[in-house]
Amino acid sequence: MLYRVTADAVLILHLAFILWVLIGALAVWRRPWLALLHLPACVWGTLVELNAWLCPLTPLENRLRQLGGEAGIGESFIAHYLLPILYPTGLTPAIQWWLGVIVVGLNGTLYAAMLYRQWRRHTGRRRQG
């Protein structure tokens, strides 16, 4: 039971990390210091996708499930609903590459918008002064 719960926790952590990589720039918009956490996560997430690497959380979760007596996919809510999101059938290196491009494109756009907003504020203050 403990292994299964721990494996589910790793799965939730994995999903949270993916969401952070995809949309963490929105949090950075409000709190710029979060870029110190978000940018390294984006680099890692992009490298994993573009190089078709295996995230270390995946074998950890699989090992915990094996130790808990599961073959991989359990009957829990988490396994039923979250596993297909993280490990979709038919995931190929080409699809992973495009996912990496999406990560870079989405976050690049958000960061560019933030920098533009800061630049506009800065140049607006200079004109007023």
Image (tube, rainbow, N blue to C red):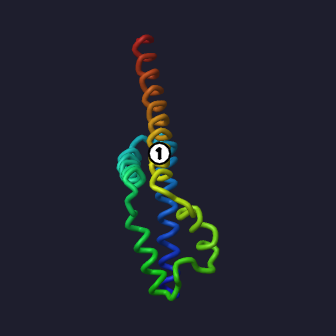
Mark 1 Cα-neighbour bin, 10 Å: few <14, some 14–19, many ≥20: many
Q: Quadrant of the C terminus?
A: top left
Q: Position of residue 125 (x, y in %)?
A: 43, 17
Q: Residue at x 47, y 51 (%)?
A: 94
In this view, 14 is above or below 101: below
Left or right: 14 with respect to 74?
Answer: left
Q: Is residue 129 above or below residue 105?
A: above
Report x, y in % for residue 84. Answer: 59, 65
Residue type at the position of mark 1 = Val
Query: Which residue is more in the foreground, 42 or 97?
Result: 97
The picture quadrant where one finds residue 79 is bottom right
In the image, taking residue 69 as reference, residue 34 lies left or right, namely: left
Between 67 and 91, the residue placed more toward the observer is 91
Q: Does 41 appear above or below 83?
A: above
Identify residue for label 1.
Answer: 103
Rendered location of residue 10, percent (x, y): 47, 71
